[in-house]
Image (cartoon, rainbow, N blue to C red):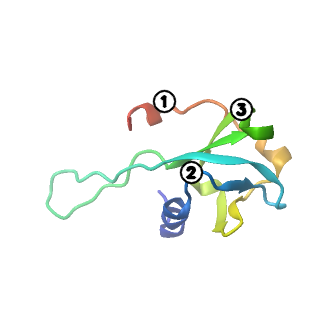
Amino acid sequence: MLHPRELELADRAAAGMAVLDAGGQQVGTVVQVHRRARVAPGDVGQVEEPPHPAAVEVRTGFLGLGQHLYIPVDAIADVTGGGLVLTLRRDELDREDWRHRPAYLEETR
């Protein structure tokens, strides 16, 4: 379940923003923020959390010619005037399995 702070960070993220690692080094640019809508299960006024977290699609590399990463919102530390700041350093990003578009994002198109 996402915490209100993570939802707020996802709402502040936008395409074109720089993406910085925890040390302040730029790792890419936001391509798209994939938000998950909350679902009303049937009872009026009752809201159910989405089954998957929101994700930020990031293009890496010089001039955006690198790979795409699909970074879950819970890996965002902050969104500032300088860009979206991650909780991980660049070398830690390489160890995460975020290079493949999650199947659940296909459901949101």
Q: Residue at x 77, y 44 (%)?
A: 93
The residue pinned by badge 2 equals: 15
Circle nearer the N terminus (2, 1): 2
The three-letter code of the residue at mark 1 reads Ala
The three-letter code of the residue at mark 2 reads Ala
Circle nearer the N terminus (2, 3): 2
The residue pinned by badge 1 equals: 103
Q: Residue at x 62, y 29 (%)?
A: 100
The answer to whether residue 14 is visible is yes
Where is residue 2? Give x, y as percent: 49, 59
User: Which tag is nearer the camera, tag 2 or tag 3?
Assistant: 2
Circle nearer the N terminus (1, 3): 3
When asked about the image quadrant of residue 9, the answer is bottom right
Where is residue 68? Give x, y as percent: 66, 35
Where is residue 51? Give x, y as percent: 41, 45
The residue pinned by badge 3 equals: 67
Provide the secondary structure element on which disc 3 rests: loop
Mark 1 touching mark 3, by CB under 8 A? no
Instruction: Determine the residue located farthest toward the front in the rendered image.
Output: 63
Q: How far is disc 2 from disc 1 in space, using C-alphas?
A: 21 Å
The three-letter code of the residue at mark 3 reads Gln
Disc 1: CA contacts within 10 A as few (<14), some (14-19) or many (>=20)? few
Q: How far is disc 1 from disc 3 in space, using C-alphas?
A: 18 Å
Whether residue 29 sits left or right of residue 72 in the image: it is right
